[in-house]
Amino acid sequence: MLAQSNPLHGYNAQRISDTRKGMLVLGGWGTANLLGGGILAATQTGEAKYFHQMNAAWGGVNLGIAALSYFSAKKIDPANFDTFQTVKEHYKTEKLFLFNAGVDLGYITAGLWLAERARRLDKNQDRWRGYGKSIAVQGAFLFAFDLANYFVHARHSKQLKPIVEGLGFT
């Protein structure tokens, strides 16, 4: 009912909901990597062992980030945002996902470099190749995840302009 009388409330509720859904996806990816990587690292040898070992480590980090973000977003009351705060939070979220996508490209590059660099090392080639491939895969997932979330929020922003104009801001 409040969302009907205050369009900002509905807009913010949807923005927060979209963020929480994204964190569920990230948390699922993190859980799969943490559990799957841990089990497979214990049962594999060579490059595969290190690939899964690194996946498990990334899984723990991703799960932690997702859980913290999910539960932080759950505490936010969408009714507490005025027009300025709504616009500010929206663009902050969009910029964060775009920035993270850029960082993800760095992960992919670093992972590929590490895997290639392993060919010229005398020691621990399996470790560095496995770690490098894992970092590249994790970076690729995060790149797709961050871009998808950016586009979800960017699409949602099209609803913001009429709300702001309807409130007398142009």
Image: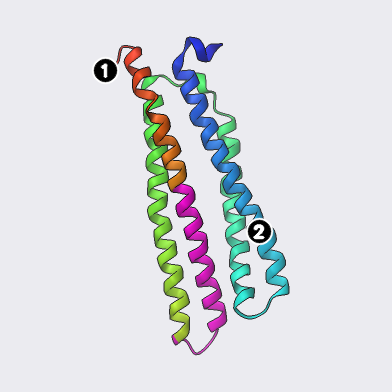
Give x and y (percent) for residue 110. 42, 68
Q: Which residue is mark 1?
A: 170
- Which of the image's four quarters has the N terminus? top right
Give x and y (percent) for residue 94. 39, 39
Q: Residue at x 44, y 19 (%)?
A: 8
- Check contact, mark 2 vs mark 1: CB within 8 A: no
Image side of residue 84 versus residue 24, left or right: left
- Furthest-left residue in this view: 170
Image side of residue 60 versus residue 88, left or right: right
Give x and y (percent) for residue 13. 52, 25
Q: Which residue is mark 2?
A: 34
Q: Which residues are magenta?
A: 120-146
- Which of the image's four quarters has the C terminus? top left
Q: Amino acid at mark 1?
A: Thr
Image side of residue 99 versus residue 142, left or right: left
Disc 2 to disc 1, C-alpha distance: 48 Å
Per the picture, the main secondary structure of the magenta-coloured stretch is: helix
- Ranked by sequence position, the earlier of labels 2 and 1 is 2
